[in-house]
Image: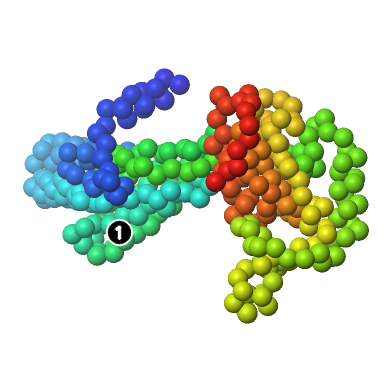
Amino acid sequence: MASKRREVWFDGLMRRCPHDDDGVATIDPRRIYILPTATGFAFGAMLFATLLGSLNYQNNLSLFLTFLMAGIALASLHHCWYNLLGLSVRCADAEPVFCGQQARFRVELWDQRGRYHGEVCLRGGGCGPIPASAHAEIDVSVATFHRGPVQIDELLIETRHPLGLFRAWAWTRTPAQVLVYPAPAPRAPPPGLGTTADHRIEAKAEASRDSGAEDFIGSRGYRPGDSPRQIDWKVLARERGLVTKEFAGDQAAEVQLELHQHRGNLEQRLSVLTRQILDAEARPLRYGLRLGTEVIPAGRGEHHKRRCLEALARYPAEFESAASTPRAAA
């Protein structure tokens, strides 16, 4: 614990490279730090022992070899520091993940002057060289511990190029973030039912779906989230716009997911809703979502699922007990 505090305190002393309006941070000379590695310390101890032996025995050839290796070490020090100088870094937002999963950020590195850089590593990610006049991309994994927008704030970039005797590093600021969905509950009531709901409602819905799932009852205008399999492509071919076919089973298989249906604290209820959204999408069902004063109309599809999960991720705790007239989400 004490070593962790010292590491945090030491990192707090480091200067960070700021980013511009485009999210690009460029490493300048005053923000590069360098220290010997364990191999570098061992190499230095060997040089000191060799120097003492050479002076004691007055061996000129050994002295020459000692100073030659010292010169190589000094050249390695310069090249290690220079390998980070001038690097431009940009980190893109990560794809949404569920709480507890690893968020993967794509980091882009390049040199605006087109200079080649040896192997460069990112903490939490991989390593690789930066080709001349080209961009390199490295993925960085970040653990997630709570739902909502999570910003990584900064990246640690380091190198041990060319001989591994020294480690140079720099911190860069980044505006990149990831939206973290609530972790799905292991189990949840059937979509549309709460922990205290009457299960006869579910049996009635199942009977309606089984009896008329294939009965065509008409067409309506296209809504975002409608399945491509339900679109009347013949009407579209006649240039009459997007029209969705409706079946009797589609109207019966429509549920409304609500926060107040479930017991437990806010995070537990959001986890149950997350599981119900995933289950409803897999069955398939048309489902809507009501969170406090926000109502998302019924729909389905990848776009609709992401919209509902984003609403759960951004739902603030202080609005848990809000009670007012529901409004339709834009």
Mark 1 belongs to which amino acid? Answer: Ile
Which residue does the image show at 42% across and 52% down from the upper left?
Answer: 106
**Does the rendering let one see residue 328?**
yes
Q: How busy is the neighbourhood of tag 1: few (under 14 within 10 Å), some, or many (20 plus)?
A: many
* Extreme residue toward the top, this view: 2
- Classify mark 1: helix, strand or loop: strand
* Extreme residue toward the bottom, this view: 238
In this picture, is 128 found above or below 189? below
Q: Which residue is mark 1?
A: 130
Which residue does the image show at 66% across and 67% down from the upper left?
Answer: 243
x and y percentages locating residue 316 in the rendered image: 55, 30
Q: Is residue 226 left or right of residue 4?
A: right
x and y percentages locating residue 149 in the rendered image: 48, 38
In the rendered image, the quadrant that contains the N terminus is top left
Q: How is the image coloured?
A: rainbow
Which residue does the image show at 41% across and 20% down from the upper left?
Answer: 2
In this picture, is 76 found above or below 114? above
- Quarter-wise, where is residue 240 in the image? bottom right
Of residues 108 and 327, which is closer to you in this image? 327
Q: Is residue 73 left or right of residue 220?
A: left
x and y percentages locating residue 225 in the rendered image: 63, 57
Of residues 264 and 216, which is closer to you in this image? 216
**Does the rendering let one see residue 183?**
no
Of residues 315 and 326, which is closer to you in this image? 326
Total count of labels: 1
Of residues 300 and 47, which is closer to you in this image? 300
